[in-house]
Amino acid sequence: MHITLVLDHPYMLESSENIPHKRSYSAAIAQNAIEMLQRSGHSVEVIDLQKDRYNPVLDRQGLLNWRTKEYVDTQSMNYLQRLRVADEIIFIFPLWWEIMPAMTKGFIDKVFCKGQVKKIAGKHLILDPKTKIRVLTACGTPQFIYSWHYRNPLGKMLKIGVFGKLGLKDFKLVNFNAEDQSEQKRMKNLKQLKKYLL
């Protein structure tokens, strides 16, 4: 399979090593996922939003393009073309205030633009409906609190409000509560990533 991995963390993919004050568990998840997938014979393309200096802001001209033209901007169009050849798309980012960072939200707003959505057999499609969507997050809130107290806002928004609307049903979301886990548990989670993917 061909997999496109979208990473959003200010420290970028290069922060995957366990070096205090220079590390990101999101990047560690991404790096381990890349290595595991490649060992299994899959091709992996990485979109590192921070490294690309992606501008998540949908400005006035961008909104006009979103409504009336084929794409918002050339970078967003490039990303969409890269997603369209993927069998699986993996989003990896930290949860801040129980939702995704601004770059990921802007990526969704701008890349999945109205001009690219096609109505086919009564469904609004922008990607092949067989495309798998996987979302892996690093969060500071324990999973049971995120699910029961906050009512899983990210999961509902992405599964129903974004990818469900776009006809993408093969969706999985996994939150890793890295802050409240021991280093041994964090490392164990990294070694077991395969069960959350593919």
Image (tube, grey):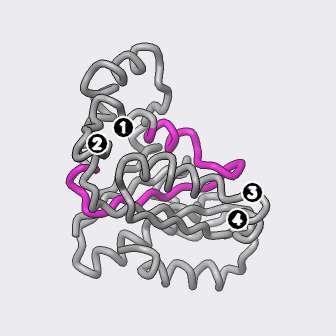
Asked whether residue 93 is drawn in magenta, I would say yes
Determine whether label 1 and label 2 are within 8 Å by CB.
yes
Task: Report, in whole angstroms, how far the alpha carbon at label 2 lies from the one at label 4.
Answer: 31 Å
Q: Residues within 10 Å of mark 1 (few under 14, many from 20)?
A: many
Specify the amino acid type for callout 4.
Ser
Please give the label number shown on residue 150. Answer: 3
Q: Nearer the viewer, residue 65 or 37?
A: 65
Q: Position of residue 76 (x, y in %)?
A: 33, 35
Please give the label number shown on residue 147. Answer: 4
Whichever of callouts 1 and 4 sits on the residue coming sooner in the sequence is 1
Q: Residues within 10 Å of mark 2 (few under 14, many from 20)?
A: many
The label nearer to you, 2 versus 3, is 3
Specify the amino acid type for callout 1.
Val
Q: Position of residue 105 (x, y in %)?
A: 52, 41
Specify the amino acid type for callout 2.
Leu
Please give the label number shown on residue 111. Answer: 1
Q: Position of residue 190 (x, y in %)?
A: 52, 78
Residue lying farthest front?
Answer: 122
Specify the amino acid type for callout 3.
Tyr
Looking at the picture, does residue 56 appear above or below residue 29? above
Task: Report, in whole angstroms, how far the alpha carbon at label 1 lies from the one at label 2.
Answer: 6 Å
**Residue range highlighted in magenta:** 83-108
Determine whether label 4 and label 3 are within 8 Å by CB.
yes
